[in-house]
Image: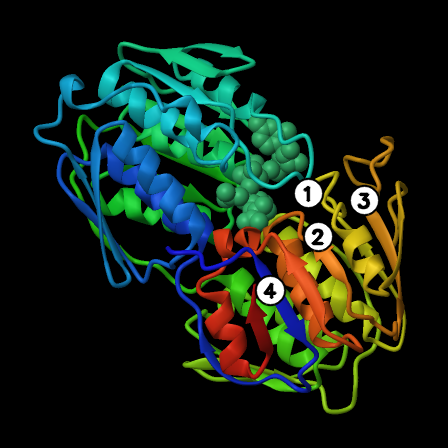
Amino acid sequence: MVRVTDTWQVEPSGPLRGDISVRGSKNAVTKHMVAAMLGDGPSTIRNAPEVGDVDITAAMLEAVGYQVARSGDEITVAPNGPVSASTVQPRVPEAFTGLNRIPILMLGPLLHRAGEAFVPLVGGDPIGRRPVDFHVNALRALGAEVDASPAGIAAKASRLHGARIELPYPSVGATETVLLSAVLAEGKTVLRNAATEPEVVELALFLQRMGAHIELSPDRRIVIEGVPRLRGATRWLAGDRLEAFSYLVAGLITRGEVRVHGCPQDRLVTAITTLATMGAQFDITDDAITASAPAGLRPAAVHTDTHPGFMTDWQQPLMVLFTQAEGMSVLHETVFENRLVYVPALQKMGCEIETFAACLGGPACRFHDTNSAHSAVIRGVSKLRGADVTLPDVRAGFSAVLAAAVADRPSVLRGIHHIERGYHRPFQQFAALGLTIRRG
Ligand code: EPU
C-alpha cells in the first residue's frame, strides 16, 4: 500500500449517498496469514483488504522465512522451501515492536516450526493496558517455557501438548493463540470461555480447511484434537462488519443513504437493531444493506460487549452519530478500559461528550471500581465545528472523518495512517459517497 500523505482536509459535503463494497476485515486477514505459517504448502486468502496491517504482517512473515505474494485481492503465504526448522527464523525482529497485535499470535506457529520463538512487544491502538497474560498462560499450559521481558516474549518447546485452559475473559486474541498453538499440539485441548467473534470462527474454519480437528461448542467451549501436520488451504473472507457499520453510519449522520455490499447480515444483527431503535430505516437484501433516517434520529443507551453484543469497534462511529441525535445518549464501554481516549479530539470538533469512570446506562462491568473513564454521556444535537485534529487510533480516526463531514467548516485530520491501517482504501470509498477530501 502506497501512502501519498498523512493528512486529509475534509470538507462538509452534505448527504453521503451511494454504494460501497467491503472486503475481508483486517482482524481476519492478518490471523489467516499467521495460520498459513502452519501449512506444509502455500495458502491463499481471497477478498483480502488493502490495509496497513497486512503490509506489517507480510513483512513479519517474510522476516521469519515465508514468502508472501499479493495479486489483486489475493494473498498467498508459502513456506520458503521444504518445511523444516532450517527454513524458519524463530525471531521476529525488534524493528516490528509496537506496530500491531500480530506478533504474539506468531509464537505458537514459530514454536511448531522451530522449537523456539521470540516476538517483540505487541502494539495496536492505545485503548487500554492490553496485557498478554492470557496468551502467555495458555502457551505455558500447552507446554511452552515462556519468558516475558521488556523487549518481548521468548518461548521454547520441543513439542506442545494438549491442555485444559479456561480464559478469565473471552479474549479474541488469546482464543486465537490457543487455536494457532493447539492445532498441531500432541493430544486434546479444551478451551473454555473462548471468544466467539465471527473473525475467530473464520480462523477456526480456515484451520479446519488446512486439516485441523476443531469442535466449536455452544457454551464458549472449543475442543481441538492436535494433528501431526496441516496442509495449505484457500479461503474467501466475508466482508468486514466494522467497515460496513462505519459506512452505514456515514450515510445516517449526513442524512444521506449508503448501501453496503459484501457484509453478511448475520454479522450486523446487533448493530442493525441498535440503529433501528434510534430511528434508522433499513432495506436488507441478500446482496446489500441500506440505511437511512429520513425522520431524524433518537438517542439511545448502548453498552459494548463480546459477540453477539454491540462490538467495541462500533462504538466510535456511534458516538459521533449520538451527537447528531436529538437528546441525551449514553455509551458504556465494557471491553477495553481506555477506549474513550479519542473523545478530546471529538470535543475539539464541538461534540458535547462527557466521560465518567462509573458504569452508566447498564450493568456494572469489570472496570466499575477503577478510575478508567469508560462511560460517556452525549448531548445531541451538537453543533460540530471544523478543526485541526490528530487522530489517535484506527476506529477513532474514522469517527473524526464522520464529525468533519457534518461540521460547519473544513477540518484538517492528521495521522491518516491510523485509518489506512484498518480500512480498505478509505479515501476512494468516501469519495465515492460524495465526501470532499483533499490530501495534504
Ligand atoms: N485481555 C487481557 N489479557 C490478555 C488478553 C486480553 O486482560 O492476555 C483483556 C484486554 O485487555 C481487553 C479484553 O481482554 O480488556 C479483550 O481483549 P481481546 O483479547 O479480546 O482483544 P484483542 O484480541 O487484543 C481484538 C481486535 C480488536 C477488537 C477486540 C475485541 C485484533 C488485532 N484486534 O483485539 O480490534 O476490538 O479484539 O473484539 O484482532 C481494532 O481493529 O481496531 C481493534 C482494536
Residue position marked by numbered label 1 in the rendering:
335
Q: State whether label 1 is within 8 Å of ligand 1.
A: yes
Q: Are marks 2 and 1 in contact (CB under 8 Å)?
A: yes
Picture residue at 40% right of the left edge, 65% below the top? 23
User: Which of the two marks, 4 or 3, is nearer to us in this view?
Assistant: 4
Picture residue at 8% right of the left edge, 28% below the top? 82
First in sequence: mark 1 vs mark 3: 1
* Residue 262 x, y percent position in the rendering: 41, 72
Task: Tell me the quarter of the picture where residue 303 sits.
Answer: bottom right
Q: State whether label 2 is within 8 Å of ligand 1.
A: no
Tell me the CA gap for discs 3 and 2.
Answer: 10 Å
User: Which of the two marks, 1 or 3, is nearer to us in this view?
Assistant: 3
Residue position marked by numbered label 4 in the rendering:
8
Q: Nearer the viewer, residue 377 or 16?
A: 16
Residue position marked by numbered label 3 in the rendering:
374
Which label number is shown at residue 304? Answer: 2
Callout 3 crowding tier (Cα within 10 Å): few <14, some 14–19, many ≥20: many
Mark 1: which amino acid? Val
First in sequence: mark 4 vs mark 1: 4
Mark 2: which amino acid? Thr
Q: Nearer the viewer, residue 358 or 118?
A: 118
Picture residue at 24% right of the left edge, 17% below the top? 114
Side of 129 where 112 appears, left or right: left
First in sequence: mark 3 vs mark 2: 2
Q: Is residue 274 visible in the rendered structure shown here? A: no
* Residue 275 x, y percent position in the rendering: 70, 73
Side of 306 where 342 appears, left or right: right
Q: Tag 2's secondary structure?
A: loop
Q: Tag 3's secondary structure?
A: loop
Quadrant position of ligand 1: top right
